[in-house]
Image: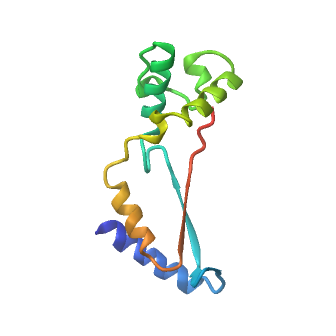
């Protein structure tokens, strides 16, 4: 597919330029790819809204969030918003996040590339 073709081309180019790598088991890791959870892999904000609305009996929608500083939207302090995000991360709303269409196939294709190490991150703590 298109993701695999692009990733394979990128992988080949980086391996040619990457004289040094590190070994993980029997595989030489030449480069790492970091995947952002929200928007790229899963609908983090949609899940957070569902959690927040369930807990606080509100009706926020993703489109209401004009800022990633959630306290600017929902009110309260930064500390309260941060604590709420941590609570969200311990719920079924987070564990069952809706996956972005095509993301799983794309990640599987990246995992099949030799010398690639994948990491999944999110910056959403408040």
Q: For the point 44% across and 70% down, which residue is it?
A: 111
Q: Quadrant of the N terminus?
A: bottom left
Q: Position of residue 24 (x, y in %)?
A: 61, 77
Figure quadrant of the C terminus: top right
> Residue drawn 44% across and 76% down?
113
Residue 67: percent from left, percent from top: 55, 29
Q: Position of residue 70 (x, y in %)?
A: 58, 26
Q: Tell me: residue 1, above or below residue 90.
A: below
Residue drawn at x 60%, y 80% as measured from the top left: 25
For image coordinates 45% across by 22% down, the residue present is 64
Residue reaching furthest left?
A: 1
Q: Quadrant of residue 72?
A: top right
| Image height of 81 relative to 115, above or below | above
Q: Is residue 45 left or right of residue 25?
A: left
Q: How many marks?
A: 0
| Furthest residue toward top | 57
Foreground: 10 or 115? 115
**How far across and down, in percent of the image, does residue 87 sit?**
59, 30
- Give the colouring mode of the picture: rainbow
């Amino acid at each position: 597919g298109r993701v695999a073709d692009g990733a394979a081309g990128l992988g080949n180019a980086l391996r040619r330029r990457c004289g040094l790598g590190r070994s993980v088991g029997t595989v030489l890791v030449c480069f790492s790819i970091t995947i952002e959870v929200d928007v790229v892999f899963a609908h983090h904000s949609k899940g957070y809204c569902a959690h927040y609305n369930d807990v606080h009996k509100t009706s926020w929608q993703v489109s209401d969030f004009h800022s990633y500083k959630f306290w600017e939207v929902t009110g309260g302090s930064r500390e309260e918003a941060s604590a709420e995000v941590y609570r969200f991360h311990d719920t079924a709303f987070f564990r069952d996040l809706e996956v972005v269409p095509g993301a799983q196939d794309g990640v599987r294709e990246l995992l099949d590339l030799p010398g690639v190490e994948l990491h999944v991150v999110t910056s959403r703590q408040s």
